[in-house]
Structures are given as structure tokens and as C-alpha cells.
Image (spheres, helix red, strand yellow):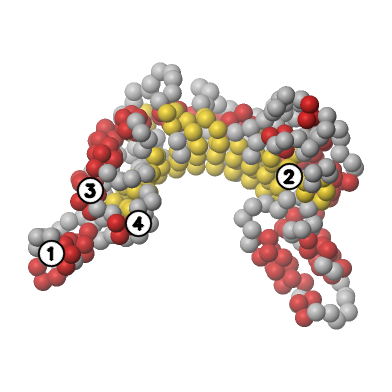
Amino acid sequence: MNYPTGPPINRLPVELLQQVFLLILNDVPENPSIFSFGDTCISADVTSPPLLLTRVCRLWRDIAHSTTEIWSRIHVALPGRIQPLKPFLPSLLEVWLARSGRRPLSLSIVSEQLCYSRDREARYLPYLRPYRSGADCRLLEILLSAKGRWETVAIMSPTIYDWSDNVDTPRLRTLKCFLREFRRFNAPNLHCLHIFNRSEFPARPAPTCKDIRHLRLQHTSVNTIRFTSVIFPHLETMVVDDYSLGAGDRIDTVTQSHLESITLPITSDRQEFIDILDGFHLPMLQKLTVVVEELKPLEIECIMAALAVATCHEPIVDLKMATPPSEVDVDIVEPLLSVAKEVAVCGKVLDLLEILSSPETWSAGNEPPLNGTNEEAPVRGVSVL
């Protein structure tokens, strides 16, 4: 491509301009949106890259069109209109995907049916009642035509009704969705799963999804957490945001042979926290992250009781809370060292020996270590990773 002399940035080699474009795209963690919604219309979102880059000048447009990587991420809001879209918008989506070449795709989908509908006909339907959308159906058809390249997918709506019941995605590695959508995927290489809504997994999940290594559940039950040992036997990390007792028969003894890290909150019913780990065999567990609203002796006793009924080798206990590390009461935390290799607090290192030897501690009647060293006080430290 030969262009006349212009602004200094346009004199850079094409390869450098492409890197600039990628830096611009990667500076925003969310996928770039293709559509913009007004009160009565839907249009292309030309206010953000990569479409914005194509409107600067002819040189930038040509370079942007030939840089496949900047088109490999996309956020699609399904309009939820009963009537089909005008041809331009589906064509724009097809062109966007074509410009990504053969690159793996990062895709996020949200349904506008969850919002107050902009479609006059849909406004007279019962609130949130599912209805078949010609517009959504066409856009999903285009997206599904590239499903063989889906690598990271986030479906951020619980009710997408114009959806296939068996989505073959051989390259899919990361999936964020509601449980309803998860059941539709045939993803043999899926490693990371994030379920948004309450999760009660079927007793026999699709065998093609059993290789999941990283799991996050926003709300689930005590029994489901324990049942993951059967559903996902290769888990390495698990994060649970909230849970309740739930229903169903309890599995008395469970084993997660590969689980290295688990994150759990302590809820108002502390016994549920203990019930999760009771009889849980965790031979590879290295870190237990516990989310607490406020650090009190009862929370520490709860953690110690849970680790006492689990089978694991003194993991690191990482306490996550709003209290600054400088305000943590070491006397409350210290008992954890009897069951944990190390204690982490709020992301900063707290050296127990240093705290015990500080003048503030001496004034409380404690003796400092001899010669200012740690030799006379072989106590395991409290640290924050």
C-alpha cells in the first residue's frame, strides 16, 4: 500500500500501526460492541474500535481491514425484535467475522429481551415472556456459522430462546453462561466454566464437558459443591460466590484428586461451611481462600473445624475481607497456624514475628525475641500472598 506523506503516525511501517491498533483494542477488557441501540433504532457502533479505526482515514481503514486479530473479539446484543432486521446489520456481522480470518473468536452475547423492549409489538407482550425474534434468530445463525472458531464465549442472558440444542464447539476453552445454555454445548476442550445463576448440575453431564479444570459458581448448594467430584473429576480450581444447603441426598465421602485451590465464603450459617468440607478428601489442596465480611473468633473456629473434618495437607489459608491488614487482630488469626501451613490476609504480608517484636507489642507486656532475631521464636508466620 502506497500513500502520500501525511501525519507522522501514518509514516510508521504497517506492522507498527497494526500493533498500535492491537494495543488500543487490548486496552479495553470487554469485547468491542458491534451494535449501538437508540430509543427507536439499531445502528453500527462506530464510536469504539475496531469500527472507529476504519473512519479515521483511508490508510487506517485499509490497515484495519487487513488486521485479522482486531476483529477476533466481538460483543453482540441481540435486539429481541419480532420483525427481522434490515439487511445492513446482519451483513455487518458477517463482514466482521470474515475479517477475523481463521483466528479463534472471543464472543459475548446479551439479549435485549431482558430490557424494556424497543419493539412496539413486543411491548404488549407479558414482561419477560419469551417470544421468537426474527432478528435474534438471524444474528445467532450467523454467529453459529463460525462456532468452530469459538474459543472464549460469554452468554450473559438467561433466556436466549432462538438457540440450538446441540452446539458443537471443538475449540471452546472458556465458557461463561447460565446453566440452561451450558447444557447445550458439546465442548470436548472446555477447561474454564463460569455459571451465573443457581447451579444444580444433572447427575450425568455431557461426557464432552468432563475435562473442566477451572470452575466458578455464583450460587449453588452444599451438595452440588461436593457433587463436583463426580461431575468434574479433573478440577484444579473452584470458586463459589454464594451457596445454601439445598436439597437431595448428601454424598458422605468425596474426593477431588486434582483440586489445588478452592474459594468459599462463610455465610450466616457457619455449619454449612463445615458441611462442605466434611469428609472431603483433597490430597492436592494447596490453598483455601475464605471470604468473610468481618474477622471474628467464630470465623476462625469455623475454618479450623472445617479443616479438621477434611483430609488435606495443611493448605495456605487466605482470608479475604474488607478490613485493612494493619487492623487485623493477630491474636484472632494466630490459632489458624495449628491447621494451616501459612495464613494469608488481604493481599499483604503480615510477619507475625515482626509484629510480636514491635514496640507496640512490648508495651502490651510481651517480650521481644532475643537479639532481635527469629532464632528464639520458631513460630510459623502469618503472611498475605
Disc on the earlier residue, 2 or 3: 2
**Residue 292 lies in what quarter of the image?**
top left
First in residue order: circle 3 vs circle 1: 3
Residue that numbered label 1 is attached to? 362
Residue type for callout 2: Val
Label 1 neighbour load within 10 Å: few <14, some 14-19, many 20+? few
Q: Nearer the viewer, mark 2 or mark 3?
A: 3
Circle 3: is it few (<14), some (14-19), or many (20+) Cα within 10 Å?
A: some
Secondary structure found at label 2: strand
Among the two numbered marks 1 and 2 on one chain, the one whose residue lies closer to the N terminus: 2
Instruction: Give the spatial CA distance, label 4 vs label 2.
Output: 40 Å
x and y, in percent, of residue 148 in the image: 72, 41
Q: Judge the density around disc 4: few (<14), some (14-19), many (≥20) Cα neighbours within 10 Å.
A: few
Evaluate whether residue 256 shows in this view. yes
Residue 88: x and y, percent? 89, 46
Q: Quadrant of the C terminus?
A: bottom left
Q: At which x and y percent is residue 128?
A: 69, 28
Marks 1 & 4, CB-CB < 8 Å contact = no
Q: Is residue 54 left or right of residue 33?
A: right
What secondary structure is marked by label 4? loop
- Residue position for label 4: 324
Q: Which residue is mark 2?
A: 76
Q: CA distance from mark 1 to mark 2?
A: 62 Å
